[in-house]
Amino acid sequence: MAYDFDEAGDFGSEHAAREWAERNNIDLADLHIRNRGDRGVTLSVRRSALGDSARNDLTYGRRTGFFS
């Protein structure tokens, strides 16, 4: 089964991305973390874990690393 993911932002490390997810009550199983080499990681969150299907939901707040 395929899932849709929305980018949540870039972080300096995988540890920082996981801490952000925990602070925002997102289950670690709903994360997709891509390594960007020396530039850190990009975090994506399973859309169904965000509680709605609005495609623009991440435009403000979540994309910058915190919920507004």
Image: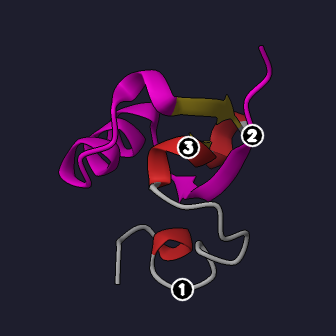
Mark 2 or mark 3, earlier in chain: 2
Quadrant in which the N terminus is drawn:
top right
* Part of the protein shown in magenta: 1-30
Pick whichever, 9 or 57, lies toward us. 57
Q: Quadrant of residue 15?
A: top left
The residue to which callout 1 is attached is 60
Q: Say whether residue 18 is magenta.
A: yes
Label 1 or label 3, whichever lies nearer to me, is 3
The residue to which callout 3 is attached is 48
Question: Mark 2 near mark 3, Cβ–Cβ under 8 Å?
Answer: yes
Q: Amino acid at mark 3?
A: Ser
Label 2 or label 1, whichever lies nearer to me, is 2
Classed neighbour count for the residue bearing mark 3: other residues with Cα under 10 Å, few (<14), some (14–19), many (≥20): few
Asked if residue 17 is positioned above or below residue 58 in the image, the reply reads: above
Mark 2 or mark 1, earlier in chain: 2
Residue in the image at 45% along x and 33% along y: 14
Residue in the image at 54% along x and 61% along y: 52
Residue in the image at 44% along x and 21% along y: 29
Q: Find numbered disc 3 in the image and state the secondary structure of the residue it sits on.
A: helix
Q: Amino acid at mark 1?
A: Tyr
Q: Find numbered disc 1 in the image and state the secondary structure of the residue it sits on.
A: loop
Q: Find numbered disc 2 in the image and state the secondary structure of the residue it sits on.
A: loop
Quick check: can you spot residue 55? yes
> Left or right of 8: which side holds 61?
left
The residue to which callout 2 is attached is 4
Mark 1 or mark 3, earlier in chain: 3
Question: Mark 2 near mark 1, Cβ–Cβ under 8 Å?
Answer: no
Q: Say whether residue 36 is magenta.
A: no
On the image, the x and y values in percent for residue 22 come to 23, 42
Residue in the image at 56% along x and 58% along y: 8
On the image, the x and y values in percent for residue 9 come to 58, 60
Pick whichever, 47 or 64, lies toward us. 47
